[in-house]
Image (cartoon, rainbow, N blue to C red):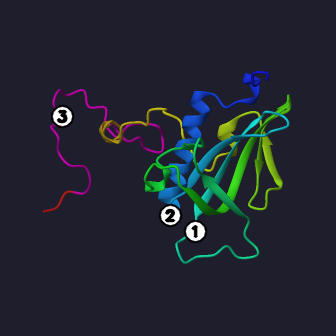
């Protein structure tokens, strides 16, 4: 058996992004969203599928693509939407998937809720519904400390040559 081509596999960073996407979808939708990584038998290219487990009394309708997620040896990403880690198999409503290709023009293909090619990109983040980077956000407290600028680009302070002329008096009309 030959080893799988590493270029057709998700990197550790990509798997983290995909797990965060499942967690973000769980929070956004208010239901458990599962993300399972798999591999195409023919091409050995990895894919990830996103799906929502059906409720105990719920059945998939005719319009919905029905899939099974989980089971022994599967790789689930993220927090599993709060479901306990186990080898259980879940009947699910398929949401969408991303698969890796060997096409130099499109490393990733996104499949829609019917399994049809929907979008493609060489950058995984472009196909995800949420920003999942670890990029540090600006500190909102520091932004509040910066002086606001007037329309003319000045920060609203007068050019008084007198030291201590502003002494922290409030701006605006004086009230008598």
Q: In the image, which is nearer the foreground, mark 1 or mark 2?
A: 1
Q: Kindly identify which numbered label has been placed on residue 165.
A: 3
Q: Residues under labels 3 and 2: Cα distance?
A: 59 Å
Most common secondary structure along the magenta stretch: loop
Q: Given this view, does label 3 or label 1 mark the residue nearer the observer?
A: 1
Q: State the residue at coordinates (57%, 38%).
A: 17
Range of residues picked out in magenta: 146-173
Image coords of residue 139 (percent x, y): 36, 37
Taking 119 as reference, is 37 left or right? left
Residue 16 is drawn in which quadrant?
top right
Q: Name the residue under label 1.
A: 54
Q: Which of marks 3 and 2 is nearer the N terminus?
A: 2
Residue that mark 2 sits on:
31
176 displayed left or right of 130: left
Q: Which of 104 and 64 is in front in this view?
A: 64
Q: Where is residue 118 in the image (x, y as percent from the top left)?
A: 80, 52
Q: Where 50 falls versus 30 (above or below)?
A: above
Query: In the rendered view, does 106 fall on the left or right side of 33?
Result: right
């Amino acid at each position: 058996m030959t080893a799988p081509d590493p270029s057709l596999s998700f990197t550790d960073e990509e798997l983290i992004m995909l797990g965060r996407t499942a967690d973000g979808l769980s929070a956004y939708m208010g239901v458990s969203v599962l993300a399972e990584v798999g591999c195409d038998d023919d091409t050995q290219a990895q894919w990830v599928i996103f799906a929502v487990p059906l409720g105990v009394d719920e059945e998939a309708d005719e319009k919905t693509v029905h899939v099974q997620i989980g089971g022994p040896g599967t790789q689930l990403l993220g927090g599993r939407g709060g479901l306990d880690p186990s080898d259980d198999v879940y009947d699910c409503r398929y949401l969408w998937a991303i698969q890796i290709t060997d096409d130099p023009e499109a490393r990733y293909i996104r499949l829609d809720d019917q399994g049809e090619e929907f979008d493609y990109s060489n950058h995984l983040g472009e196909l995800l519904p949420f920003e999942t980077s670890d990029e540090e956000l600006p500190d909102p407290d520091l932004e509040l400390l910066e002086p606001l600028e007037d329309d003319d680009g000045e920060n609203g302070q007068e050019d008084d040559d007198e030291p201590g002329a502003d002494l922290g008096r409030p701006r605006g009309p004086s009230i008598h």
